[in-house]
Image (spheres, rainbow, N blue to C red):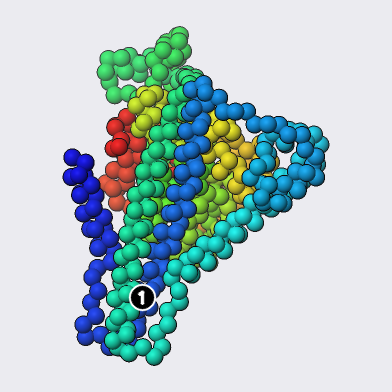
Amino acid sequence: MLVAEAEEKKHEKERVVNASFPPLKMAGLSVQELQDLCKDLHRKIDVVDEARYDMQIKVAKNDTEIQTLNQKIIELKGVKRPSLKRVKKTTDDMLGAYTDTSKLMKADFKANLKTVKKEDEKTKLLKMAAVMLEKEKEEKKHEREATLNDKVPALQLSGLSMQDLQAMCKELHHKIDVVDEERYDIDAKVTKNNKEIENLSLKIFELKGKMKRPALKRVKISADAMLGALLGAKVKESVDFKANLKTVKKEEEKKEEVTDWRKNVDAMSGFCCFVLRMSKYKLFLLRHGEGAWNKENRFCSWVDQKLSEDGVKEAQDCGRLLKEQGYKFDLVFTSILSRSIQTAWLVLEAMGQEWVPVVKSWRLNERHYGSLIGLNRAEMALQHGEEKVKLWRRSYDVTPPPIDESHPYFLEIYNDRRYTTCDVAKENLPRAESLKEVLDRLLPYWDSTVVPEIKNGRTVLISAHGNSCRALLKHLEGISDVDIASVTLPTGIPVLLELDENLKPVKPRQLLGDQAKIQAAIKKVEDQGKAKQTAT
Ligand SMILES: O=C(O)[C@@H](COP(=O)(O)O)OP(=O)(O)O
């Protein structure tokens, strides 16, 4: 069986590599055409080699992460890592250690920082560390460029005969195959490592046994609705009967609190009230195209992942659709996470409106999923039940357990330079958020920065995330705390809101595009929280 599997993998690899670079056809080509072909092949080697190089770096990073996670598991199982020696060092010694890279690896920063009492000394050290990190990043960039240039030296075509050119084409074509095969193998390793990291993270999560049962939300619901639910009528999955029974004390409580503007509208005989109010402004909300971790079904949140290939296409399709429908933007707001920025760029490019200003703020970031970050939703549903995962993902005021320093992505997030640019100090940035907390941090930005632009007549696109857009929709449409749980946004689908002069919606939100596809995409996002077995 193992042999058969290995054979199958080999064929798959050959198929993929051959499909990316079909056989060489040189018959009948002129000298000029052969030169062009050489250039094209040379460029392709560059592209594949860059991809290969980046993946190799990722493998190295993942290997370190796997080691750290394994160590963590050993510790959690009770075998203690030998404690780090706390060396009392003067600030000058420490600064020396930071500037001397050979000592840098040995410095136990955490232990030492505790010994540095004065605040200004700590700041000095942190600044030095930031400079060091920046320098290291630059060095890595140069190293990358140097390695890539070495591997694919510049093309020399002048004075080559037709025969020479044909030989060179063959050589370059062969080289592409070699590099692409390497890239393929490394890619497979990245996928394997990702899976391993995911499993280890899950194991740690379980070992810590930290997961507190999130407080159940008390939903006010009418007695009739509850009886209906008990008798099998169609009810929302999120209803918590126990909590509800306690809230239903008197028959008067049958009166359901209606804060959803759409319900109010229904109560006032439907659409007539829309036509009474004029649409003054158009606002577009967009959840970015599919990100790498959306594809892997992992909670991505504040981890900075790029768009997947499908995500790039979604963003481009979205731009083309908006262009076809004749929309023009004056201003785009994004979060400070790459997937929302990349989406904004691709949309603007597809619309031919690249010049439109793009303004970024952490306040539009995805909801901070705390310690759930990096974990696979389906596996969490298997472990903790679909209901709980739904509460974490869709309830209004349940905050997931916070991220702490031992979390595998803690440093990647909080050491990122972008979080030194926020309008709150890094240590006051969230460690986990409910949807309510997202709205709390988003509203001041909306009121102070976005609203004035809209009221000045600018057509605004907000390219953000599933939950930051849901929070904004809740605010704008007055959706109730309960009903917001059933609002799900698919990736790459623009949501058009038509607003009156007070920025109140005058008609239901429109998800633009093929409605059947949109419904299928919404279902796909909802199903991410189901406990289906993931392939191993
Ligand atoms: O953090 C994430 O993984 C998703 C949302 O996850 P769910 O709330 O859908 O679980 O955010 P986005 O892809 O919009 O940036």
| Image location of residue 62, percent across then percent down | 46, 44
| Image location of residue 13, percent across then percent down | 26, 55
| Image location of residue 413, percent across then percent down | 56, 42
Which amino acid type corresponds to the residue marked 1 in the rendered image? Asp
For mark 1, does the 10 Å Cα neighbourhood hold few (<14), some (14 to 19), or many (20 or more) residues? some
| Image location of residue 515, percent across then percent down | 29, 48
User: Which residue corresponds to the image point at 27% horizontal and 20% vertical from the top-left?
Assistant: 233
Res 483 seen here:
no
In the figure, residue 432 lies in which quadrant? top right
Q: Is residue 54 above or below residue 157?
A: above
User: Which residue corresponds to the image point at 18% horizontal and 40% vertical from the top-left?
Assistant: 1
Q: Is residue 205 above or below residue 103?
A: above
Q: Nearer the viewer, residue 100 or 401?
A: 100
SS class, disc 1: helix
Q: Report which residue position mark 1 lands on.
A: 40
User: Which residue corresponds to the image point at 44% horizontal and 54% vertical from the top-left?
Assistant: 56
User: Which residue corresponds to the image point at 25% horizontal and 63% vertical from the top-left?
Assistant: 18
Q: In the figure, is residue 101 to the left or right of 400?
A: right
Residue lying furthest top? 249
Q: In the figure, is residue 143 to the left or right of 263?
A: right
Res 536 seen here:
yes
Question: Which corner quadrant of the figure contains ligand 1?
Answer: top left
Q: Nearer the viewer, residue 128 or 106?
A: 106
Q: Quadrant of the C terminus?
A: top left
Q: Is residue 103 above or below residue 270?
A: below
Q: Nearer the viewer, residue 244 or 508?
A: 244
